Structure formats: C-alpha cells, structure tokens
Amino acid sequence: MLTNYTTGAGCSAASESSERAHRIIAAGLISVKQLRYFVSKMTWKEVLSHHKTLRGIGRHSLLVDRGESGYRNRFLPDGSILYPGEGLTGHQQPLGGNLTLLNALACQTPMRVFLRKRPNCWQDLGLYRVESVEHRFEETERRYVYWFRLVPLKAAT
C-alpha cells in the first residue's frame, strides 16, 4: 500500500521559524543542537531526498502522522511512538517494511523519523531505535498487526 504525502500547501515562512528559534535559545530553554527538533520544518521534497520512497517505512527512515495516512501511530507521553506495521488489510507479514523494522530491532539500527505536521510540512524528529515489537491479533480489525515501539535516541548536548 503506497501512501502519497505530496499534496497541499507549504510551511510557514523561514523568518518566522528563525525568530522563534532565537527567542527559545535566548530564554535558555534548549541548546542550539536540540533546536532543530522543535522548530525545523521541511517540505515533502526535502523529506523525500532522505527517505527515498513514498512508503511509510524506508531503508533508514520512517514517516509518521496523526492518522491522515490511515495508520494509527500512537505518540506516548515518554516520547516513544507505537508504530503499526506495514499493510492496512489482511494479516501483516514479516515482509517489506515490517522486515526492515524487524532487522532494525535485531541489529539496533537507528531510524530517522519524520512527522507530517500538515500537507507538505514535515518535522525531523531525529533518530529513534526500535525497542520492541508485538505481533498481535486486533479484534476490531480481525487481523494480526505488528506494533513497533520506537524510542528516541538522546540528543548529544
């Protein structure tokens, strides 16, 4: 199942982000290195240059959203993400993107995560590692679904 994220309007002006960034740093709330996680906005073209596929799971990165793609990503209070496996119908299998995430878990390979804020406006959430996986039967969907727990890597300060 391909999900196309390319439609819609662009991000707000760069000067707006720059002004906000200066205020946040001046207030001592975060360091310059941490800043990009809070104010960095990217276009789909910029995300695609790194992600290299229209699918949600790439070789080294993932796309997340708040349900627009049909997938129910769950954002937890501790900063981790419950990420459903690839495939909106039928039992999910250990193939394609699911296999990529299973391998990332086994090898502890970090994956970059991009969050869709609105059409054509994305935020680089940074690197996450796949901490665990559960392949369980979802009664409401009558099928087996993978749930990958993604945990953010701590940013170097």
Image: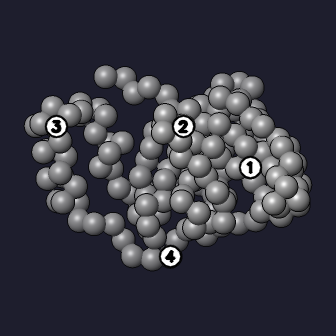
Q: Which residue is mark 3?
A: 25
- For mark 3, give the secondary structure: helix
Residue 7 marker: 4
Q: Give the residue pinned by disc 2.
A: 80
Q: Which residue is mark 1?
A: 85
- Quadrant location of the C terminus in the rendered image: top left
Q: Position of residue 77 (x, y in %)?
A: 48, 39
Residue placed at 45% from the left, 77% from the top?
8
Q: Is residue 32 above or below residue 87?
A: above
The first of marks 3 and 2 along the sequence is: 3
Ranked by sequence position, the earlier of labels 4 and 3 is 4
State which quarter of the image contains the N terminus.
bottom right
Q: Are marks 3 and 1 in contact (CB under 8 Å)?
A: no
Task: Of the two numbered discs 2 and 1 on the same chain, state the one appearing first in sequence.
Answer: 2
Q: Nearer the viewer, residue 38 or 72?
A: 72
Query: Which residue ends up furthest to the bottom in the rendered image?
Result: 8
**Cα distance, mark 3 to mark 2?**
25 Å
Q: Which marked residue is nearer to the observer: mark 4 or mark 3?
A: 3
**Mark 4 surroundings within 10 Å by alpha-carbon count, few (fewer than 14), some (14 through 19), many (20 or more):** few
User: Are discs 3 and 2 less than 8 Å apart at CB?
Assistant: no
Decide: is 142 above or below 95. below
Identify which amino acid the numbered label 3 is placed on.
Answer: Ile
Cα–Cα gap, marks 4 and 1: 24 Å
Callout 1 environment at 10 Å: few (<14), some (14 to 19), or many (20+)? many
First reached walking from the N terminus: tag 4 or tag 1? 4
Residue occupying the far front of the picture = 139
Q: Amino acid at mark 2?
A: Ser
State the image coordinates of residue 94 (x, y, percent, origin top left). 85, 43
Residue 41, quarter of the rendered image: bottom left
